[in-house]
Amino acid sequence: MAVAIQTQGILLKVIFMQVIKGKITDNLGYQVGGTIYYYYPGWESTGYETFLGLSYKELTVTAQTLLNNVTFGNKGDTYFLATYAPALPAGFTGKAQLGAYYYGDDDEFTAKTENTFAFRHATLGLSHALGTTGANWSLDYILGGYDRTEIKQKNKVVLGLAYAF
């Protein structure tokens, strides 16, 4: 289980996520799980989301679907992510991703959704372990797509540092 806690002024955001991973064959795997988004103080903002994934070798496709209407999305909103992450020479790992959204049409708390499907982003990246420290660095270029109200998202370069413990 992963738990992330963020504060922004008096807003408290807590994310609980549990994903179970397994193998069907040597090359075929699955992921099943769920996420709870909890905001305090929040008005209709606690969200529940399913997580389903299927992988074949270096290719993974996932879908995350909201189960209820909240201030940041609608019941049925589904985020799809396809990731290809091949091992490269000299210990590097590549990453190519495409993200898209299917939008539910309830619009109880969100702005009116004009389209039911939208390209969200494309990402190209590279990562490498930092020796035997357990840390990794990554560099990604994100080509921004569009949100539910057709606002263009910015393109960005992201430098990351991760440490697993």
Image (tube, grey):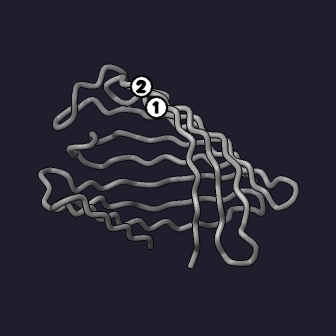
**Position of 5 compared to 24: left or right?**
left
For label 2, the SS is: loop
Residues at discs 1 and 2 in contact (Cβ within 8 Å): yes
Residue 130 place in picture, x, y as percent: 71, 69
What is the number of the mark on residue 145?
none
Disc 1 crowd rating (10 Å Cα; few below 14, some 14-19, many 20+) is few
Q: Residue at x 34, y 29 (%)?
A: 148
**Vertical placement of residue 75 versus 41, above or below:** above
Q: Residue at x 33, y 40 (%)?
A: 76
Give the labeled residue for mark 1: 154
* Quarter placement of the C terminus: bottom right
For label 1, the SS is: loop
Residue 12 place in picture, x, y as percent: 22, 63
Instruction: Please identify the quarter of the rendering in which residue 47 is found.
Output: bottom left
Q: Nearer the viewer, residue 48 or 155?
A: 155
Instruction: Please identify the quarter of the rendering in which residue 29 is found.
Output: bottom right
Q: Residue at x 77, y 51 (%)?
A: 86
**Position of 59 compared to 30: left or right?**
right
Give the labeled residue for mark 2: 152
Q: Nearer the viewer, residue 113 or 121?
A: 121
* Quarter placement of the N terminus: bottom left
Instruction: Please identify the quarter of the rendering in which residue 79 is found.
Output: top left
Q: Which amino acid is tagged 2?
A: Lys
Residue 84 place in picture, x, y as percent: 69, 45
Q: Which amino acid is tagged 1?
A: Lys
**Vertical placement of residue 77 versus 86, above or below:** above
Residue 57 place in picture, x, y as percent: 76, 53
**Vertical placement of residue 15 versus 59, above or below:** below
**Position of 133 compared to 33: left or right?**
right
